[in-house]
Image (tube, helix red, strand yellow):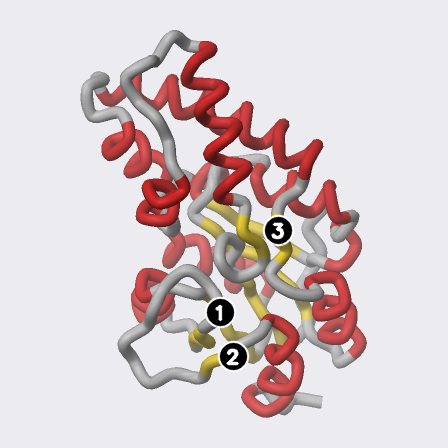
Amino acid sequence: MRRDLNKKAIIFDMDGTLWDSVDNIVDSWNLALRQVGETGVVVTRERIIGLMGKTMDQFAKELLPHYAPDRGMEVMHILEEEENDYLRQHGAVLLGDVEGTFRRLRDLGFGIGIVSNCQSGYIEAFLEYYHLQDLVDDIECYGNTLHGKADNLKLLIERNGPEQYCYLGDTQGDYDVCREAGVPFVWAAYGFGDVSADVPRIEALEEIVPLAQELINLP
């Protein structure tokens, strides 16, 4: 699906920025855990929110510490596949007018990317359910590269070559990886987390459109 980003681009985080899939993750993971015979682990919304933004190997270490690392990742892959299938069928809770925001940005000449610490297939499930494939130019995630968000941000930018860009995320972790990657950051203050730094912020997804025009004023 990759198309080159324009010379100006907005790169989006997923969870807490574009949608809230936590309840569907909880439902699908608890179902998958029962299917593999794991009765000692119960996933809750609070627990998942506490892990959001971490890579899937970190999820495995924290949710399944009683397993050897290889087995823990095997179980995580089962959970991930169940989750992707569930999201393709049910979607999740959008955090604003995602399609309208993407269309307005594209009309203004912005390319659109998505970078997340999720598994392979997760972003695709989001795009497929909401029919957004034609509005998003490039995506990257931990599951594809086995690298964290900072590396994946740099990878997406390097292969597309936009002149100006920023990343919209909702947590301190998103801000930290943007500093590491040298990517300007905008805080989605309506999301899951807080950010201690004084950074540009929006209180609703749709506000990224006028803010992007202010921050990135290329023609």
Q: Position of residue 127 (x, y in %)?
A: 69, 47
Evaluate whether residue 205 shows in this view: yes
Q: Position of residue 91 (x, y in %)?
A: 66, 41
Reading the chain from its start, which is encountered first: label 1 or label 3? 3
Along the line of sight, the residue nearer the viewer: 118 or 193: 193
User: Circle 2 sits on which residue?
Assistant: 202
Is tag 3's residue or tag 2's residue first in the polypeptide sequence?
Answer: 3
Mark 2 touches mark 1? (CB < 8 Å): yes
- Distance from disc 3 to disc 2, alpha carbons, whole Å, reads 19 Å
- Position of the C terminus, as image quadrant, is bottom right
Image location of residue 4, percent across then percent down = 68, 61
Given residues 46 and 14, the one toward you in this image is 46
- Residue 147 visible, this angle: no
Secondary structure at numbered mark 3:
strand
Q: Nearer the viewer, residue 196 or 163?
A: 196
Tell me: 127 left or right of 148: right
Check disc 3 and give the amino acid type. Val
**Type of residue at label 1?**
Tyr
Q: Amino acid under label 2?
A: Ile
Report which quarter residue 123 is drawn in.
top right
- Relative to 208, is 38 above or below? above
| Residue with the mark numbered 3 | 93
**Label 2's element?**
strand
* Image depth: mark 3 or mark 2 in front: 3
Q: Residues within 10 Å of mark 3 (few under 14, many from 20)?
A: some
- Where 200 sits versus 53, above or below? below
Which residue shows up at 46% across the image and 65% down it?
169
Residue 190 marker: 1
